[in-house]
Image (tube, rainbow, N blue to C red):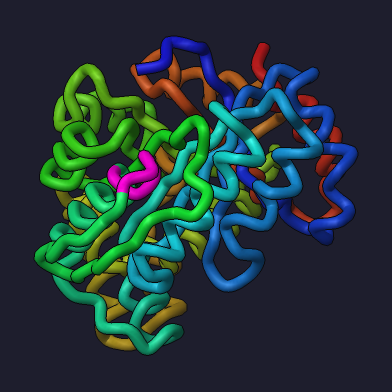
Amino acid sequence: MDSTPRWGITLPLPGLALAEQRDIVSGLADLGYTDAWSAELNGIDAFTPLVLASQWAPRLRLGTAIAPIYTRGPGLLAMTAATLADLAPGRFMMGVGTSTPVVVQQWNAIPFEAPYARSRDTLRFLRTALAGEKVTASYETFTVSGFRLERPPAVPPGLALAALRPRMLRLAAADADAAITNWLSPADVAAVRAAAGPDCELVARIFVCPTTDAGLARLIGRRMLTAYLTVPAYAAFHDWLGRGEMLAPMQRLWSSGDRKGATEAIPDQVVDDLVIYGDLATCQDRVAQYQAAGLETPVIAVVPPPGTDLAQVIRGLAPA
């Protein structure tokens, strides 16, 4: 496990067109940021921002968090990972994960089946393919016949797996180089670390809303949390972490179709645990608490209220 002290940022940056992000991204390393990890949902894909960052910021480690394993076939995942590894040799980590049934089934018309087995099989395929070997294998969830990268990377990328609970965390520790999670508090890091073991790098996206208006921050946080914590995997994650009882009213209202009521039912304590807000110094200190708790790579995701000066926020959240 890499012992370099790390401090990451999420790309693409919110509120800016991708082509407008060059000046900020190119200055991240000088501010002390070590990493840039992409996010992918229904906007910009996970790889294009990292292609640009590989040229704009040649000192940053880059990672996908995450590239879904259902919406791209195994060979395409390997080709794209090899391309990024060639653009950023020794600086790219391929983060993969299942994503969610909404993304996979509702948006991409692909069955969301056997997530654990598909994750395991994808990691094993990628490890072999990115080493330049020819792959002919029948895995539990897919079969590959005669695939070999035309241009395998000189330095194969590290692999990371999105993992929320013990079984998937143990898989990340066994078959990947890092585990990726999000929506956790500093106090939750110990449980994740215990499940992953001592040698697996932990990467987590940390949501930061830079405002001293607690009401506004909680409003923004509740809307985000409702979208995530009603997903079965995240609901189970927070039940495991001990928030099941606090979130039960929200889950009941959501299941009954009362979306507004579900959002309002999330307790302040949950929002305050999972969303950082306050002045920039306070936010910076809260991010550092994750590191002190044993998280190797905090990855800040800025959630800016209207009128936020994004460049100023990124400067203010740089590591002390």
Residue 139 position within the rendered picture, expressed as x and y whole percent measured from the top left? 13, 62
Instruction: Identify which residue is drawn at 36% across, 39% down.
Output: 131
Tell me which segment is drawn in magenta: 128-133
Q: Is residue 184 left or right of residue 300?
A: left
Residue 92, position as x, y percentages in the image = 54, 36
Residue 65 placed where, x, y %? 47, 49
Q: Is residue 286 visible?
A: yes
For the residue pair 62 and 214, the one nearer the viewer reads as 62
Q: Based on the displayed image, in which of its 4 quarters is residue 176 positioned?
A: top left
Where the N terminus falls, by quadrant? top left
Task: Please tell me which residue is depicted at 76% across the width and 32% down the height of the picture.
Answer: 57
Residue 88, compared with residue 225, is above or below; it is: above
> Is 64 positioned to the left or the right of 281 in the image?
left
Q: Position of residue 157 (x, y in %)?
A: 45, 36
> Measuring 38% from the left and 70% from the top, which residue is drawn there?
73
Front position in the image: 130 or 257? 130
